[in-house]
Amino acid sequence: MVYVEITGLILFIVLMTLGYRKNNRNLMLISALCLLVGLAGPDFVSGFIEGFNAGKQAA
């Protein structure tokens, strides 16, 4: 999990810098998605699934 976070952060920095210099919005969007995956990716998804399944069982 730590490797996903570090890779996402490094990709964010590199792609954001390249997108800003080239004035490319799509590249900057991809970099923002890399940051989202890096910071909230695996842990957030597993927690969301657990909470969703718990809500279905309670209802």
Image (cartoon, rainbow, N blue to C red):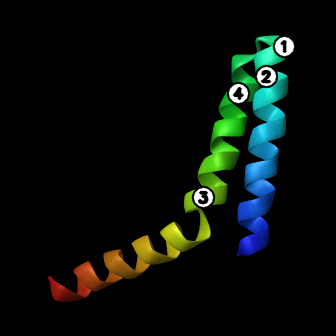
**Mark 4 surroundings within 10 Å by alpha-carbon count, few (fewer than 14), some (14 through 19), many (20 or more):** many
Q: CA distance from mark 4 to mark 3?
A: 17 Å
Q: Residue at x 66, y 57 (%)?
A: 38
Q: Earlier in the sequence, mark 3 or mark 1?
A: 1
Residue matched to label 1: 22
Rendered view: 8 above or below 22: below
Residue matched to label 4: 28
Task: Identify the secondary structure beneath mark 2.
Answer: helix
Residue matched to label 2: 19
Depth order, front residue of 53/51: 51
Q: CA distance from mark 1 to mark 4?
A: 10 Å
**Residue type at tag 4:** Met
Q: CA distance from mark 4 to mark 2?
A: 5 Å
Q: Residue at x 64, y 38 (%)?
A: 32
Q: Quadrant of the C terminus?
A: bottom left
Task: Identify the secondary structure beneath mark 4.
Answer: helix
**Mark 2 surroundings within 10 Å by alpha-carbon count, few (fewer than 14), some (14 through 19), many (20 or more):** some
Q: Measured from the top left, where is residue 18 in percent x and y?
A: 85, 25
Q: Earlier in the sequence, mark 1 or mark 4?
A: 1
Residue 39: mark: 3
Total numbered badges shown on the rendered structure: 4
Rendered view: 32 above or below 58: above
Q: Are marks 4 and 2 in contact (CB under 8 Å)?
A: yes
